[in-house]
Image (cartoon, rainbow, N blue to C red):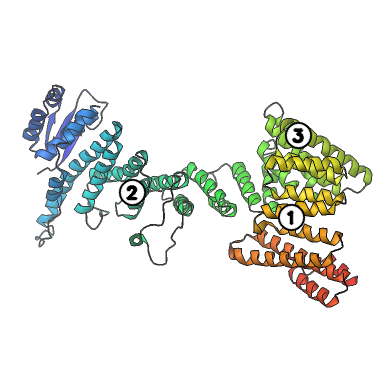
Amino acid sequence: MLGSQSTDSTDNVEDKEVRQVCANGICMKTTDVEAKLDEGNIQEAESSLREGLSLNFEEARALLGRLEYQRGNIEGALRVFDGIDLQAAIQRFQPPPPEKSTRKGRTRGDSQHAISQHAASLVLEAIYLKAKSLQKLGRLTEAAHECSSVLDAVERIFQQGIPDVQVDARLQDTVSQAVELLPELLKQAGKCHEAMSAYRRALLSQWNLDNDCCARIQKAFAVFLLHCGVEAGPPSLAAQIDGSYIPRNNLEEAILLLMILMKKFHIGKAKWDPSVIEHLKFALSLCGQTSVLAKQLEEIMPGVFNRVERWNTLALCYSGAGQSDAALNLLRKSLHKHERPDDLMALLLAAKICSEDSLLAAEGVGYAQRAIANSQQMNEHLTGVGLRMLGICLGKQAKVSSSDFERSRLQSEALKSLDGAIAFEHNNPDLIFELGVQYAEQRNLNVALRYAKQFIDATGGSILKGWRLLALILSAQQRFSEAEVVTDAALDETAKWEQGPLLRLKAKLKISQSRPMDAIETYRYLLALVQAQRKSFGPLRSISQVEDDKFNEFEVWQGLANLYSSLAHWKDVEVCLGKARELKQFSAEILHTEEY
């Protein structure tokens, strides 16, 4: 029986001056053994180990193979490992049935089991090294089979799972390494479904893995789920626990794993890995849950992240979640003169947020100008983006200008900035659209019409706002029938949930053509669409989506009230105003309609 074994100098491959192996309290130098291996006499080398260390066949082969592997002779190690009968070894390693305790409290079975663990660790390590050897030779399927056989053997030896205590350290290391290696081998062999099963087996079975090893496996599995391109499907029913959350797809399972890792980092069960938060950013951005990502970033302990980077990332998350005020406040801190006042990306994001609100447009102009100054001679694309943001902010600022002269000046500067941006971004559809909007607001309708058509051509007519802009410009030119044709064409190409703005425009076009009854029918259809959309998405909507839905439904009721008012249908007006007031209690539009 093998009481202990080691390779002195021991398992260090780099120490070639003194190398020896020890087992059963006996040590011997490997000089003679290595000489026989160099001559190709595997049997004689094996006999030397068996006689010198009192080993059986499998144990001597395991030590000999490990020696060859450490020497870098991969093919020679593989020839040695091929002679090991794993199944026969497992039979000897099975734990004996428990016996009655002696007076000292330790059974004979315990002693034998401790010895069998040492022997098992040597043989299982040999099979693991065989898998590593096959991997290095590119025989990945065979390597995966050998690695899997290690784990199968461990499950038969430890039928109740590996206990937390009284486990041979070398055996535990071999098991941990095999658990980590198997899914990697299957991935390299292109067997995606088998790799996913191996990952789940690694995480759900009782391998007694340490926290860092478990964290590495969870991270690798999450990354594989995100990028493998093969749908994993839910875990088997045997692995599911009543009342537990069951991921429905790869993305949900990856997010769950990454969030478990983040929790481990927070409570100190695993070492911080910055790549985990990067993968979580990608995963949550894919499903539009940037508010969840913001919460995860806020829970990270101070000092782990640079605070300015944290502010900028949080601002991006809140901006994506529709919480522009929170995002802008964070960017103001980030761009303070004592922090990073010239951070180009933060300046552009701040300018973009300000460009969405006329009251913040003047602040946005300052951010855009600073971004342009910092991007010159560095990045032409970002210079173009800065000029575009500057043009949009100037256009929004013009809308709240207190004088005609100031408004005219700001509009002129807005067009100048947008024209300057087009020199850097010739084929940017968003820039073309903004030019169309600016020219339309300045009543230069022919040029605006040209840009609207150019935007539709550039996007293939796939974006709703292009059709809407074209219809608005045609209606401004009193070409109502053509505008209605454009609206109908856009409705045919638009998904049902996105038809709201087009239907509202269509109703107004019918009113302009003195067809109020047709307009009422269009409003009724629009109202049904808005209400159905609200019920369909239910509790999954964000706060900003809820507010947008309320505003859209309010506009529909208000539009119907105005239309019925023009027809002197007063009872219908009262009903519509009552519905509108439920959505928006204090409204100048409602008061105006009531007074009228």
In the depicted structure, whether residue 471 falls above or below residue 554: above
Left or right of 558? Residue 332 is left
Is residue 367 shown to the viewer in this render?
Answer: no
The label shown at residue 459 is none
Tell me how far mark 2 sits from mark 3, CA to CA: 53 Å
For image coordinates 84% across by 66% down, the residue present is 516
Tell me how far mark 3 sits from mark 1, CA to CA: 33 Å
- The mark lying in front, picked from 1 and 2, is 1
- The residue positioned farthest toward the left in the image shown: 51
x then y, percent, for residue 100: 10, 62
On the rendered image, what quadrant is the C terminus found in? bottom right
Residue contact at pointers 1 and 2, CB within 8 angstroms: no
- Neighbours of disc 2 within 10 Å: few (<14), some (14-19), many (20+): many
Residue 56 or 404: which is nearer the viewer? 404
The label shown at residue 198 is 2
Left or right of 491? Residue 220 is left
Left or right of 169? Residue 95 is left
Q: Which residue is mark 1?
A: 488
Tell me how far mark 1 sits from mark 2, CA to CA: 54 Å
- Neighbours of disc 3 within 10 Å: few (<14), some (14-19), many (20+): many
In the depicted structure, whether residue 29 falls above or below residue 265: above
x then y, percent, for residue 594: 87, 72
- Neighbours of disc 1 within 10 Å: few (<14), some (14-19), many (20+): some
x then y, percent, for residue 400: 86, 50
Q: Which residue is mark 3?
A: 421
- Element class at badge 3: helix
Sequence-first tag of 3 and 1 = 3
x then y, percent, for residue 533: 64, 63
Which amino acid type is marked by label 3? Ala
In the depicted structure, whether residue 471 falls above or below residue 531: above
